[in-house]
Amino acid sequence: MKCSNPDCGKKGIPHYANFCPDCGTIISANVDTSNKKEVSSTQISKYEEFQILPSNTIIDDNPIIINKPKKFNGCSIIFILMFIGIIITVIVLNNNETSDDDSSLINIDDNIENSKTPIDEKTATYLSVSNDNLISDSEGGVYEININTDGNWEISTGTASWGHISKEDGSLTLTIDKNASNSSRSDYFVVKAGNYEKQINITQYANTKPSASIENIWMEYNIYKNGYLGMNIHVKFNVYNMNGKTIYGYAYFYHSDNTTPLHDANGNNLKFYNYGISNYDQCIFNDLTIFVPYFGLNMGYGTGSVTLSFDISIVDASGNQYARKDNFQFIYTQ
């Protein structure tokens, strides 16, 4: 089909077109409406997007063609607003990240500065000790060990409860408790400097000497024994290396000053005792009871109430004393 506008005269226009694609002249009169073909929405939109101005706006005998305003539905508006919102969010996040990046750079610098090793903290290149095999008798004692290294050192592994370590600049002091048992014991501790370690072994000999220790003393008043009124003194104590030997517990009596003695009939320091036999090298006497009759205190009649005291001594059959505790006060009332 050909355009009916003599100034245009475009040829090859489809027979179903309503406008000339070049000049926009209406050519629908040439269309056969009795046998009209269906035109797709894509083809129609191709021609509907142009709008022809009125004839009085023609300049230089050529019609001015402008784009037909686009229509925006609700979905398009929402999409545009969302797109703007996304752009704003991205801008804000970029600003925040820039601020965070600045602070993180400062933190990194601080960490680098703080992680610098002080000049005086040298890494050790050697380590030696003056004694790495310490031997002690049963009495224990205090021992000094010199540490030789060019770096910082520490005690990386400590001792058992019977050993005590104090650290100095170039040495350490080891204090060993007394070994009261009849068995030897051993332990060790470790000194570390950098990647170097030194193990110091400790051996303590068994206690082979007879000894004793008093754990507790308590009293029980107004007790009858063999028809006499008096009091019981209870003693709990341990003995070591006295297997098979007879052990005595003595109570020596004094006035309240715990210095002036009470006297027996012969004028000697008044005392009462009891005894037992040790059946082991390390034997515990849980309750050695010493009965003291009140009349045996020799206080005489009309004394009233007075404060007296006593001491407890643990001895063997030969009179050798192994433990003693003094000045236990009580009130005697006649």
Image (tube, rainbow, N blue to C red):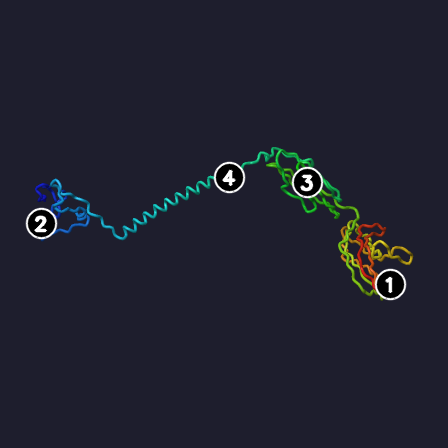
**Amino acid type at mark 4:** Asp
Q: Circle 1 sits on which residue?
A: 303
Work out whether mark 2 precedes mark 1 in sequence or the reverse, and give the earlier one. 2
Q: Earlier in the sequence, mark 1 or mark 4?
A: 4
Q: CA distance from mark 4 to mark 2?
A: 85 Å
- The N terminus lies in which quarter of the figure? top left
Q: Which residue is mark 2?
A: 29
**What amino acid does circle 3 point to?**
Asn
User: The residue tagged with tag 2: helix, strand or loop?
Assistant: helix
Question: Which percent across, then down, holds residue 248?
Answer: 82, 54
Q: Position of residue 47 (x, y in %)?
A: 16, 47
Q: Earlier in the sequence, mark 3 or mark 2?
A: 2
Name the amino acid, label 1: Thr
Nearer to us: label 4 or label 2: 4
Badge 4 or badge 2: first in the primary sequence? 2
Nearest the eye: 242 or 29: 29
Label 3 vs label 2, nearer the camera: 2
Q: Nearer the viewer, residue 68 or 146?
A: 68
What secondary structure is found at the residue carrying circle 3? strand
